[in-house]
Image: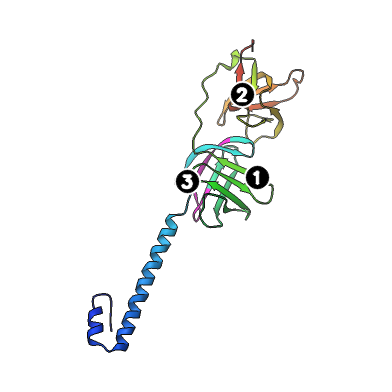
């Protein structure tokens, strides 16, 4: 019998045509098997993942800006852990692409993912949620003497509204939506693991409890 590449010459020299044909078929099948393995390795290498190690980044769940940690999870998938306590896990549900790649979460819902290092995920059924992840961590806000300011201006960073919370926590109930650019009274500020928060109030509505993260506030002097 013929085994391997080293005896191909002997096959064709000493064996009859039938055995030579069988030997050639064996070598051809070996070549196809090696090519198939190589193709699968190349295809696997092209799979785009948004994270190859745990990273802490700026993220948005719909209009709520938070920080989140993104890390690999499952078979080619990844996990997003939001500072507001929500956790989402995704695995590929379609071929690799940087535009509208189909991803499936743990509940079986389909999301479309676009981007690479910075990316978005849009839920295709259910509540229609949208997740955005930036590849750059925002710089910490400059230190501010909060006690020296009694007025603040809401900043939506390009969005028309700012979320107001019932407690200084992204996981708290939403108490209302403020309009970006409007000026409110600053009543008190506190800090926790999710940053600095300030309680704000509308003139004449001192009974309402409204908290805003420092990232969405511009501190004003009394004369502004």
The residue wearing badge 3 is: 51
Quadrant in the picture for the N terminus? bottom left
Bin the neighbour count of mark 2 within 10 Å (Cα to Cα): few under 14, some 14-19, many 20 and up. Answer: many
What residue is rendered at 55% in x and 49% in y?
A: 99
Element carrying mark 2: strand
Bin the neighbour count of mark 1 within 10 Å (Cα to Cα): few under 14, some 14-19, many 20 and up. Answer: some
Where residue 198 appears, as percent x and y from the top left, is 63, 23
Render colour scheme: rainbow
In the image, 130 versus 106, the foreground residue is 130
Mark 1 or 2 closer to N-term? 1
| 201 left or right, relative to 117 | right
Q: CA distance from mark 3 to mark 1?
A: 21 Å
Q: CA distance from mark 1 to mark 2?
A: 25 Å
| 29 left or right, relative to 80 | left
- 104 shown above or below 51: below
Mark 3 or 2 closer to N-term? 3
- As drawn, the label of residue 217 is 2
Where residue 214 appears, as percent x and y from the top left, is 59, 25
In the image, 189 versus 160, the foreground residue is 160
Q: CA distance from mark 3 to mark 2?
A: 31 Å
Element carrying mark 1: loop
In the image, 48 versus 193, the foreground residue is 48
Magenta span:
66-78
Where residue 190 appears, as percent x and y from the top left, is 60, 23
- As drawn, the label of residue 129 is 1
């Amino acid at each position: 019998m013929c085994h391997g590449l080293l005896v191909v010459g002997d096959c064709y020299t000493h064996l009859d045509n039938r055995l030579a044909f069988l030997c050639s078929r064996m070598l051809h099948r070996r070549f196809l098997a090696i090519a198939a393995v190589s193709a699968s390795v190349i295809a696997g290498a092209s799979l785009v993942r948004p994270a190859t190690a745990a990273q802490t980044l700026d993220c948005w769940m719909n209009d709520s800006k938070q920080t989140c940690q993104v890390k690999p999870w499952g078979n080619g998938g990844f996990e997003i852990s939001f500072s507001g306590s929500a956790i989402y896990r995704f695995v590929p549900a379609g071929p690799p692409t940087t535009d509208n790649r189909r991803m499936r979460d743990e509940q079986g819902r389909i999301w479309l993912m676009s981007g690479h290092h910075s990316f978005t995920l849009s839920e295709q059924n259910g509540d229609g949620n949208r997740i955005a992840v930036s590849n750059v961590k925002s710089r910490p806000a400059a230190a501010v003497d909060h006690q020296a300011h009694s007025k603040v201006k809401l900043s939506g960073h390009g969005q028309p509204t700012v979320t107001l919370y019932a407690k200084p926590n992204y996981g708290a109930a939403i108490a209302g939506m403020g309009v970006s650019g409007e000026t409110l009274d600053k009543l008190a500020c506190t800090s926790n693991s999710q940053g600095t928060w300030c309680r704000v109030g509308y003139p004449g509505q001192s009974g309402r409890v409204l908290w805003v993260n420092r990232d969405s506030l511009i501190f004003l002097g009394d004369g502004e």
